[in-house]
Image (spheres, rainbow, N blue to C red):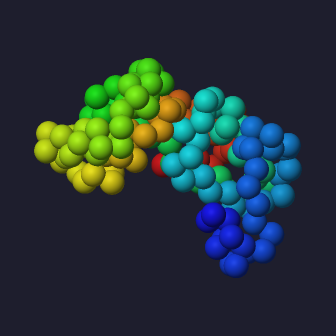
Amino acid sequence: MRLKYVKKINPTARVFDLFELEPNPVYDFVLSWGVLHHTKDTREAFSKVASQVKKGGMLHVMIYDKKNDYFYDGFRGKTSPEKHEFWEKLSMKEKIELCERKVKEKGGNIHGWFDALNPKYNWSFSPEVVKQWFVEEGFSHIKW
């Protein structure tokens, strides 16, 4: 498990359920890179993460931009849970073949397509929506 390796660097590292986080605004800087949009409720997940940042601290997130949904043929955005049901029924060989077809049709690489098609939740949001979340959580110096 990866946690074993992380603990070599940070012995206090732990795994937890994001949705069970209690407000604990003690951190100067919180980073969530490519995680929140893979949860069942991205807005609630954002709020849980934001609750860990102390007043005047910095929250840095990466959330998929809605303008790119078209590229992923329904595997990102509102249709992603239904598309995931299709994906889950494929054998590993079929998943790799699908990724190979996507590479030929649209570019990229097999690893990138596998990563894009695999998650059940693959939500995306406009920058304006995400900026509003920052405002609602009390952040005032929002940079994009």
**Residue 50 against residue 80 in the figure, above or below:** below
Residue 107, horizontal then vertical, whole percent: 18, 47
Q: Residue at x 69, y 32 (%)?
A: 44
Residue 53, horizontal then vertical, whole percent: 76, 52
**Residue 133 against residue 96 in the figure, above or below:** above
Q: Is residue 77 visible?
A: no
Residue 67, horizontal then vertical, whole percent: 34, 32
Q: Residue at x 33, y 54 (%)?
A: 111
Left or right: 22 in relation to 49: right
Residue 20, horizontal then vertical, whole percent: 80, 40
The foreground one among 46 and 81 is 81
Q: Across the whole image, how many numbered discs are drawn on residues?
A: 0
Residue lying at the far left of the rendered structure = 104
| Figure quadrant of the N terminus | bottom right
Q: Residue at x 40, y 28 (%)?
A: 89
Residue lying at the far bottom of the rendered structure = 8
Q: Is residue 110 visible?
A: yes
Q: Residue at x 75, y 66 (%)?
A: 13
Left or right: 24 in relation to 2: right
**Residue 101 against residue 61 in the figure, above or below:** above
